[in-house]
Image (cartoon, rainbow, N blue to C red):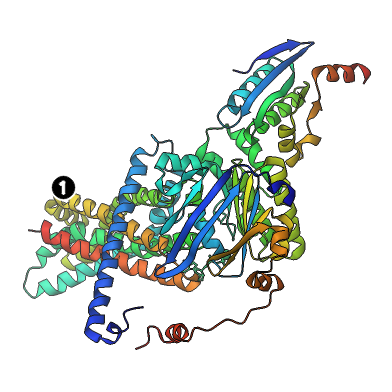
Amino acid sequence: MSVNTQQQGSPVVEVRNLVTYYGTRKILDDISMNVCEGEIMVIMGGSGSGKSTLLRYMLGLHRPDEGEVRLFGRDISRLGGREWQEVRRRIGVAFQGGALFNSMTVGENVRLPLREHTRLDENTMRIMSRMKLEVVNLSGFEHLMPAQLSGGMVKRAALARALVMDPEILFFDEPSAGLDPVVAADLDKLILRIRDATRVAIVVVTHELESAFEIADRITVLDRGRILMIGTVDEVRNSDNARVRNLLSRTSEDIEVDAEDYLQRLTEGAD
Amino acid sequence: MYPVEEKQGFSVVCLHGEVDLSNSPEARRTILNCLKKLRHVMVDLSAVEYIDSSGVASLVEGFQYARSNNLEFGLIGVSEAAMGVLRLARLDQVFHIYPSLDDRLGNGSRG
Amino acid sequence: MAAGVERHNGPQRLIEGVGRRFVAGVEEFGYGGTLLVESLFWLLLGRWFRQPVRLPAVAEEMMSIGVRAIPVLVILAFANGAMMAMQGIYTLRDFGAESHVVPGIAMSVVREFGVLIAGIVVAGRSGSAIAARIGTMQMAQEVDALRVMGISPVRYLVAPVLAAMLLMMPALTVLANCLAIVGGGVFSVMELHIGWVTYFDRVLAVLSSDDIAQGMIKSLVFGVLITLVATANGFSASGGAEGLGRATTRSVVLCISAIVVADMIFTFFLSR
Ligand SMILES: Nc1ncnc2c1ncn2[C@@H]1O[C@H](COP(=O)(O)OP(=O)(O)O)[C@@H](O)[C@H]1O
Ligand SMILES: [Mg+2]
């Protein structure tokens, strides 16, 4: 897989010197990275390292405090309403918990983007949504409510909804989290199949090493809001960066203590 | 409007360029119109650069309509890009797909 | 972080706290305002932008906000009318002014209590339900999902509620008025030894279209307030099940406070 990363297409996602805060707490620090056409980019890192946050900024759910995010070459914080709408029709997102609408059946969930954005014939929309449910192996579950689905099925339904408009970029937050290994591996295969068939660029956020190595063309390793490295699977595997090695061997490294900082953390807000 | 040629008892619908949300309704209408005239239909995809799911859905609708009216419906000249999309939804196992109209006729006389 | 010195300064902290609350309050007001403007925009112009407010959703909201509130509303309005009659008759009897009870009931129900009861019933039921629903969606990232699909959460979640409120609140108010007057009638007819016909004659004699309009306008304002408070609290919910509970409680309390305060302001200006 790492073979075709040399001849990358043009970037569809560009993050430039992104700095973000929650309140006064800095969450992402000076993040710069690209995702190219037809590439699977995995954003990997421990829990709380800022992966989901980075994803949210890529989706334009927040405005960067510093730096910029570009989708299809356009700075998303400068887009007008109509232009944003255009860009959003070209991306699909599967959120961590699926974010299916509980008041609608699975089929209605998958059709929702079509219903809102297109004027296609009802019959065409139904066929399209069923085709996507076929792709994710959920055929026949169209009429179920999201509450009736298992964890893996929810993720696949969310994937079907994300794919229904044939996006050029697919974002997928934690596809394998909370799933048993067999189901998770199936989902990985599905992601690869989708990429091979449609040449969609895929951004996957995960903390699962196995999954990351299985599907990635390139991996961005995130640690405490900073990028440790960006590289192919082999480059990450063979990295001699101590932090990366720690992450790979899953040993919790001894956390260095800054005495002043530590004391501050313990006593902050106390009278 | 997509061109339709009458050849050897078939209406050959030539889709071309990018068949996406903006023009798949047109493709759908063209295909269904031919079928409603009770013509056998071949859809020529050789000039298609890209076909999205709404385009494929139009093909599915045509195929379904043809089957329920005992008409023939096939795809010819399916490009690799279009084939990928069909394969993803396993539709390559559903549609009658021929390299060209001649192949269909050759097959037909043999079968 | 650099505020180490100020941290131990009591009064300053108090002022800081008050200031922060004040700013947060103003922000919330502004947020409510933008929700209102945006909802009205979608209701009026959505169709033109090919993004209409979904009518089935409006109908559904009308059911849950309006129709399902009727049983409670009937009981409360009836009881309230009866209580007003009892209080009025017993207190005014001492002054020999019993005959003024019926006009009193009619006026205060139509101007004040009918709409207030409708408001409180809707605030209690829907103020919590709407905040809980939107809060749940917010936490499950469903609101984000709408946004990235290019579907305005305000159009999808707030505008149907606003439309339903604007339609149902006046209807519920009319219903509450009628039942409160009937409730007052039951007791008045017995105690004052008048017939139902006389009772309704006296009621209608004092009511002007202005009074009724006043109640209707208030009902619309209450509907808007409940919508904005409940949806704003839903959208700002965070922090798991506990946070959801906090948001819904806060929503009900603020909804009821908002309509009572708004009612007072109305009465102050309109009763003069
Ligand atoms: N809504 C929020 N408010 C405040 N802090 C948050 C919020 N969401 C996430 N954080 C913090 O941001 C950091 C990164 O979170 P996140 O991006 O979710 O990490 P990851 O997805 O890598 O597990 C965490 O320390 C988390 O506590
Ligand atoms: Mg996460």
- Residue A149 % position (x, y): 66, 58
Q: Quadrant of residue C258?
A: bottom left
- Residue C182 % position (x, y): 26, 59
Q: Residue furthest right?
A: B110
Q: Quadrant of residue A175?
A: bottom right
Secondary structure of the residue carrying tag 1 is: helix
Residue C20 showing in the rendered view: yes
Q: Residue furthest front?
A: A240
Residue C146 is left or right of residue C107, and the answer is right
- The residue nearer to you, when weighing A241 against C13, is A241
State which quarter of the image contains the C terminus of chain C. Answer: bottom left
The residue at which mark 1 appears reads as C209
Residue positioned 44% across, 55% down in the render: A67
Residue positioned 71% across, 55% down in the render: A215
- Residue C233 % position (x, y): 38, 63
Residue A67 is left or right of residue C171, and the answer is right
State which quarter of the image contains the N terminus of chain C. Answer: bottom left
The picture quadrant for ligand 2 comes to bottom right
Instruction: Report in which chain the residue with disc 1 lies.
Output: C
Residue B24 is left or right of residue B38, and the answer is left
Q: Quadrant of residue B67?
A: top right
Residue A220 showing in the rendered view: no
The image shows residue B36, relative to residue A125, as above or below, that is: above
**Amino acid type, mark 1:** Ser
The image shows residue A222, relative to residue A125, as above or below, that is: below
The image shows residue C200, relative to residue A132, as above or below, that is: below
Residue positioned 28% across, 51% down in the render: C170
- Residue B40 % position (x, y): 76, 17
